[in-house]
Amino acid sequence: MSDNSQILKIAIIILIAILLGIIIAYLIVRKLTNKEEQKIIKQLRQGTKAKNFSTEILYQKLYLIYLKIPFIKRYLVKLRRRLEIINVQDEYLTRKQTAKILTNMLLLIIPATLLIIYLNRNNYLMLTILLISEIFFLDLYIDSRVDKVDNKLLKQQINFFTDVRHSYHEVNMVEEAIYDVIQDEEEKEIARQGERIYEILNSDDPESEIEKYYDVAPNSYLKEFAGISYLTKEYGDMKDKDGSSVYLKNLNHITEEMQLELLKRDKLDYTFQSLSIISILPMLFLEPLKYWAVNQFGMTAIEEFYNGKPGMIIQILVLVITFICYTLIRKLKDNGAISNIRIKNEENPWQNKLFNIPIIKQFVQLFIPKKGTKNYRKIVNKLKDSAAKTKIEWLYVNRITFVILTFVISNFLVISLHKVAIDYVYTSPTTDYDVIGTLSQRDKIKADELTKKDNEIIKIFKGRKNVTNNQIKEILKQTEYYKDSSDEKLDVAAKRINEKLNIINNEYLRLV
């Protein structure tokens, strides 16, 4: 009996141990399960919870800030108009891309501008040249970024049209083929264009909608695709003499044209690689070259050339030629991309705003031919033939503005050249002998002192005509500096001062 009770106790203990083991195992499993569930819930919460810092939100805020800054707003609007053609009806992405490109541009240009201003704070000519060159670089940077987006879209179009071709083989319906491809399309840029074309094909008035799309399509290939898709949907697909689908054949031709276009753009990019930047380099090396020539050769004649009117004229010519070369290279590199399309505000351009000012309106109307005259009809017909949306009033605003700007800039340059020539006479070190090489510090002090003495005499005779050497000589004898000088020295000084006087008296703005 005792043995049985002993066995029973052992059995009960084993059962209790098993039960405890099951309970412990259950608690452990439950704890692990709860942890896993909490982890999943936490991940889900993090996925839906807004981050404290998000580049997406940052770019949207930066876009609004840039919109309030006048100079940056100009580039923002210019860039936006190019990008919104690609990002059909996607305002969020357009703002993001615009702000991103502008931010990268500003991160490069602001430190460069501050460095340029600091290094050239005493050289206004070089400072102006470098700041102008920065504007060229801004345009180059924006064009390169937009070209990149446009080329990306063109590559996506090739794959998209190939997928549409395969889908059309299966369903034999244009709109369904486009819809099927859109559903599986991973590239957002071409997917938006496909969605827009699909909406046009299924709209109540596809003909007018497709005309609107022609005005905003990123490139001619999407226009062609939309056009043949509309015609095929409306009138059905036709077979050629070989029994092949005309729609698919046209699609193949468009794809081949796009491939050739990509090859052409690659060749143009390779041919004109860095050429736009190289065309600007002469402008950047004007001052360094001047500094090198003066210090390397050590000749007073070189310094006189650069500081005088001839040097100023040469520098202006270099700037003008640089600008012309840069413009021509940009025109030659034009590959028909979005960045090369001149996108204007044709509804209310600056010409219209200017023309609506009453005083300016009355002034401009003095030059516009009267309605009904031969000249008026001739100009209007030329505008129509060129498919320009420019009004005749805007055309004359452009012409008058160009004339006024040319007049102001020309007068400013001429006056500046006269001032350079006069300042050179007043400040150039004067010597009684021909200088080969550079002056020593001692000789330079003497030359500057002689220049000051000459300037005192020049002030007496300035503006007077037909001044003779003898008149100057008489005044020189009365000065402290020349009172004990010989006649030969006085003759040399009088001749030198008279030559300077003639230069100053002849440097004025002539009307004829």
Image: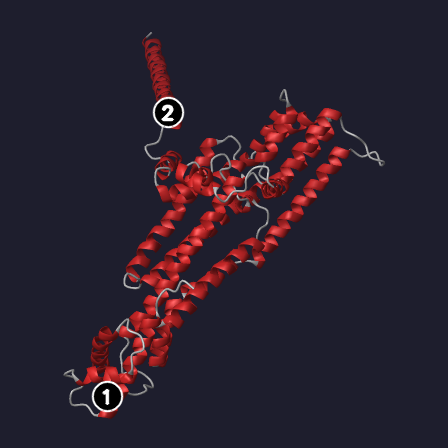
The residue type indicated by label 2 comes to Arg
Closer to us: mark 2 or mark 1?
A: 1
Quarter of the image holding residue 406? Answer: bottom left
Let me know if residue 209 appears in the view. Answer: yes
Q: Is residue 287 above or below residue 191?
A: below
Quarter of the image holding residue 208? Answer: top right
x 51%, y 56%: residue: 327
Q: Residues within 10 Å of mark 2 (few under 14, many from 20)?
A: few
Q: Residues within 10 Å of mark 1 (few under 14, many from 20)?
A: many
Placement of the C terminus among the 4 image quadrants: bottom left
Placement of the N terminus among the 4 image quadrants: top left
Measuring from the top left, give residue 169's x and y in whole percent: 73, 30
Q: Nearer the viewer, residue 215 or 300?
A: 300
Let me know if residue 167 appears in the view. Answer: no
Residue located beneath label 2 in the image: 45
Give the number of the disc on residue 490.
1
Measuring from the top left, give residue 183's x and y in whole percent: 59, 28
Q: Nearer the viewer, residue 121 or 494?
A: 494
Q: Nearer the viewer, residue 182 or 225?
A: 225
**How far separated are the C-alphas under marks 2 and 1?**
98 Å
Q: Is residue 95 above or below residue 30?
A: below
Q: Is residue 323 left or right of residue 497?
A: right
Farthest right residue? 241
Measuring from the top left, give residue 438's x and y in whole percent: 30, 82
Quarter of the image holding residue 362? Answer: top left
x 72%, y 25%: residue: 234
Farthest top residue? 1
Asked whether disc 2 touches disc 1, contact meaning CB atoms under 8 Å apart, the reply is no
